[in-house]
Amino acid sequence: MSPRLILAATAAATILLGLAPSALAEDPNDVLPDGPGKDVVVRACTGCHEAFQISEKPRAPIEWEMTIGKMVDNGAELTPQENDIVYAYLLKHFGKPAAGDAAPPVPKAAAPPSR
Ligand code: HEC
């Protein structure tokens, strides 16, 4: 490669790298609120499906417990300690009262516009 070609290739790479951040601005994990445990959830829970799968529906404590267990069966890698961290995070941000608790129903999120 001539020095000129290398220069041109470097310039092209620089332009491409410069464009990358805006192309990635739409981070599907933005639906996960910041807080302790988010890093574990992002690592262990967003490899197979988007975080929206997690955030779309509030679940009762027992439902999260079972869902996490099911995901571990699916192949999610969690140490026992991480299991607790993920459980606490999900319950805090996407929890709902256990069935039987006298609480008003969680309002349904607005349906996305159909096209
Ligand atoms: C190895 C791949 C994999 C990993 C890792 C994974 N999931 Fe899943 N997840 C799936 C698959 C496959 C489905 C759909 C089938 C099912 O429900 O098991 C799913 C479905 C879900 C659903 C919807 C299930 C339902 O019953 O409505 C939730 C909620 C969910 N995952 C949460 C999580 C959480 C939280 C984690 C991290 C602890 C996680 N997932 C990690 C593969 C994975």
Image (cartoon, rainbow, N blue to C red):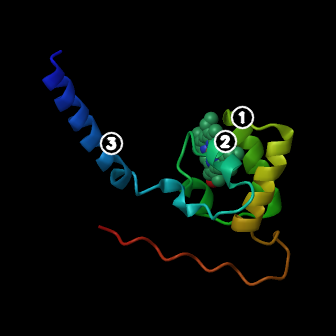
For label 2, being within 8 Å of ligand 1 is answered yes
Task: Specify which label sits upstream in the sequence, 1 or 3.
Answer: 3
Q: Residue 49 appears at what percent x and percent y?
A: 54, 45
Residue type (three-letter) at the residue carrying disc 2? Ala
* Residue 20 to residue 52: above or below: above
Q: Secondary structure at mark 3?
A: helix
Q: Which residue is mark 3?
A: 17
According to the picture, the residue beneath numbered tag 2 turns out to be 44
Question: How far apart are labels 3 and 2 at the CA level?
Answer: 27 Å
Label 1 close to label 2 by CB (< 8 Å):
yes
Disc 3 residue type (three-letter): Leu
Helix, strand or loop at mark 1: loop
In which quadrant of the rendered image does the N terminus lie? top left
Where's residue 6, x and y in %?
21, 24
Q: Is mark 1 within 8 Å of ligand 1?
A: yes
In the structure shown, which secondary structural element does the residue marked by tag 2 occupy? helix
Residue carrying label 1: 77
Marks 1 and 2, how far apart in space? 6 Å
Query: Can you tell which of label 1 and label 3 is closer to the viewer?
Result: 3
Q: Residues within 10 Å of mark 2 (few under 14, many from 20)?
A: some
Say left or right for 113 vs 105: left
- Which residue is depicted at the point 72% across and 63% down? 59
**Residue at 70 percent of width and 66 percent of height:** 93
Q: Is residue 78 above or below residue 28?
A: above
C-alpha separation, residue under disc 1 versus residue under disc 3 = 32 Å
**Label 1 is placed on what type of residue?**
Glu
